[in-house]
Image (cartoon, coloured by chain):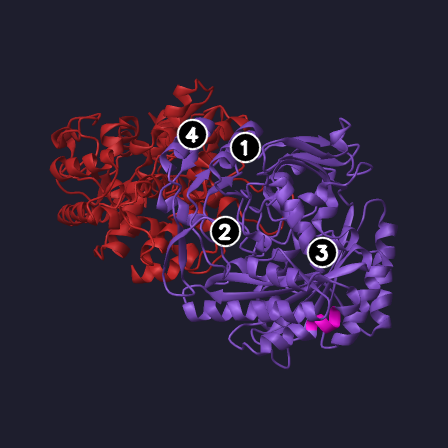
Amino acid sequence: MVEIEKTVGEEGKELVIHKKAPNHGAIFKELIDIVGEEYVMDKSASLFVYSGDMTENVPHMPEFVVAPITVDEIQKIILLANRERIPVVPFVSGSNLGGLTIPLEGGIIVDLKRMNKILEVNERDQYAIIEAGVTFADIKDYLDKNHPNLIFTYTYATPAAGVVPNVLLEGLVTLSAKYGTTVAFINGLEAVLPTGEIVKVGSCATSKYWFSRNPLPDLIGLFTSWQGMTGIVTKIAVQLDPKPAYTGIKMIMSDEIHESFQLMEELGRAQICDNIIMFNWGLAFAVIQMPREIAGSEKDESAPTIYLEMDYSAVNTIKEFEAKGEIIESLAKKYECGLWDYKDVGDGITKVLDVPMTFAGLFTHGPGGLTWIGAYGPCSQYETAWNVANEVFSRHPRFTPWLYAKTFKHGHFGAMRTLIGFDRSNAEEVRETRVLIREMAKALMDIGYIPYKTPVEIAEMVLERSDPNFALFMKKIKNALDPNRIMNPGRWGL
Amino acid sequence: MTEIENWTHMCTRCGTCHNVYKLKLWEKSIPDWLTVCPAGEKYGFEPYFPSGKMWIARGITEGKLELDDPELLKIIYSCTLCGNCEKQCQTDILKEHITDIIETLRERVVEAGLGPMPKQKEFGEWTKKEHNPYLESHENRLSWLPFDKSELPEKADIIYFVGCTSSYRQKNIASATANILKKLGVNFTILKDEWCCGSPLQRTGQSKIARECAEHNIEILKNAGAKRVVTSCAGCYRMLVKDYKERYGLDYDFEIIHFPDFLLDLLNKGELKLEKSINRTITYHDPCHIGRHMGIYDSPREMLEKIPGIKLVEMERIKENAWCCGSGGGVKSSFSDLAMFAAKERCDEALKTGAQALVSTCPFCWRNLNDAIEANNLNLKMYDLVELIWEIIQ
């Protein structure tokens, strides 16, 4: 544990500064030798930008920021960090909403943005091998220009979000109803372990093709949801899909919550949608910026309570596409839910439906703070989770409830996301946000959901509720892989 | 700083400002998620992107960062203030003020005696003495004039405000402009005591000197009986129209016209005839100062398309999304590597269109883009729009 030198600012706007390594100057010089003078920073102004993110999590100053461009440079940085026992935190855009790139114990931030090459696209085997800093904008741009018949799924974040962190942290995407979280898109990866070895995991460990994580022992899980604690992933192969010839979106706007969730569950099992997402009136206005007369700026009697969006597509024929649309219509009729074509909902919806979407209304809502509890759980508990989340929000009326639920993997599980926009310049509001986050995590865990991309405090809550041997198992793995505890120390409370 | 304190809190560092923002990506007519920030793309680190600068501004306003931080000067001055980020940011209020915040930071470091960058300080000091930032003598300001200055009347309805870059460096643009005016028989003059418009000073935080320049220029323009002021410089145009009024609160009742707009008006009225053909494929670079900053995108294109023989082809990033040439905001003088990086990228983009020539309407863009063409031996010819017009009518 790196000692804290001081904390500046009042609670809610605080900044933690750690003591520098006794041989700071020598480490700085060595980092320059590794990556070049232009790509190392150690002064406060630069470090401050990496100290925090848009969430309520307490910022911590790193000691260095370094921007390597090769795997060899990353390996050298890791070896140096081991020798000096200095923490290392990987970073691409820092927009994960879990405070996951905040250097809890100071140390070296490794900004991977320069590693932005798409190394290979295999059209016949439908995968792309990309470097660690590739963004959703990069891959979209590259595929459109060079492989227009292929798509990669898209995240619910800004185009500057990194693909590799997103898939390692189980992001939810536009094809989640088919495939699940983005972890499902990983075919294989290359990583520098915390002790400096470079490893390949997945079929690429044995074959020249990065076609699958099977059939070798699946070690990809050693890197997913570990929040950068088990190494730096330098390359990853992600699955691509054929670009559909036909795409469509249908929507339901309703006050009938129970029926809508029943429909959502059945739609998952029907296996026809790429994306199924239920969002509330708050999100409808904030993100999608639906016309006020449709969504309302505050919940009033005229505004529908919930909005169910169903995206579907067909790769082959219009007949296939129309058949899917007919099934959606028939299920909607069964539950007496009225359908809208999305073109009737207003132009603002394109901000979320056209990819890569910016989610502009969320990230840019004004006061500058955005956080969440995102939790995965069983589809059978959608409605309960929805009600529980609303109840927690009702205890904190200063925050507009922003909720959405998503179906994963044809209804095998789902997500409940509760988003909180807050005023980061108001310390008191930041403090209340922290309370709300804890309450929300507890309430969702009480009904069987599990938060993901968790900040430390919530991660600790998760482990407290877990089988003690699960936590012990995690610790053993972490200690085995990272004996000097250099990789993103403090995450998961480990 | 109170106002900017409120603005800086609005930035979540979401990264929307890194790329061209679009809504309907499936539509073929909309370009890809192309990059927009020269400093961010050149240096790679978060602090060099606009969002990083917003966070640094917040750190300063909250007292968590000091102005004398050794890396601060490089970060806040390695920005061309092109304003492309403001076109991509989707946060209301903040998106109007990103460059204002950076300029305010620059003013703060100048007030504290810590800035600007050494070369910028040198041209600031020189401007106080000789009224130009190019370390040239004020008495040589009109040395480019293609005819005897005695031919210039003391007063005229139309005044050509030349600007320093055209007076001392891109004399080709000044000469072409004056020649066109003379050839067309326009009753115009050029002020012998014109000073720097103040743009390079204002943009580098030296607002006190910039204001002095502005006050002087307004006074002499009024004294000369100006009814219309034409300028061939995008930076001067922005200063005269926007900064003089909005920032310094200076009042005047004459009209300021960017020279290509003046020419388009003459062309539409039949007072300018383009009869000779120029058979060339060209692409147009939008200068930040008249494009994003002043909203002039279409008239230079309209003018170019009316030149017989010209085939105008567009680059990927145009109009509000145009990639900056890299010279503005004091970058050309203090971060030549960044200026050259941005200009090279723009020239490469121009070459991709198949154009033989790159045309702009700003002497500063001309200079930096041409430097990149020469340094990289590119098969591209640089023009200002007025040079093409003069080529036709001379």
Instruction: Pick whichever, B32 or A98, lies toward us.
Output: A98
Task: Estimate the spatial distance between the alpha carbons at disc 3 and disc 1, rounded to whole Å.
Answer: 33 Å
Q: Colour of chain A?
A: purple
Q: Examine the residues drawn in magenta and state their main secondary structure.
A: helix
Task: Estimate the spatial distance between the alpha carbons at disc 1 and disc 2, rounded to whole Å.
Answer: 19 Å
Residue B321 falls within the magenta-colored stretch: no
* Chain under numbered label 4: A
Q: Colour of chain B?
A: red
Residue labelled with disc 2: A102
Q: Which residue of the protein is positioned furthest toward the top in this rendering?
A: B377
Mark earlier in primary sequence (3, 4): 4
Judge the density around disc 2: few (<14), some (14-19), many (≥20) Cα neighbours within 10 Å.
many
The kind of residue on which mark 1 rests is: Ile
Q: Which mark is residue A74?
A: 1
Q: Which residues are magenta?
A: A382-386
The kind of residue on which mark 2 rests is: Ile
Task: Estimate the spatial distance between the alpha carbons at disc 3 and disc 2, rounded to whole Å.
Answer: 28 Å
Mark earlier in primary sequence (3, 1): 1
Residue labelled with disc 4: A30
Instruction: Pick whichever, B331 or A79, lies toward us.
Output: A79
**How far across and down, in percent of the image, does residue A340 sit?**
74, 66
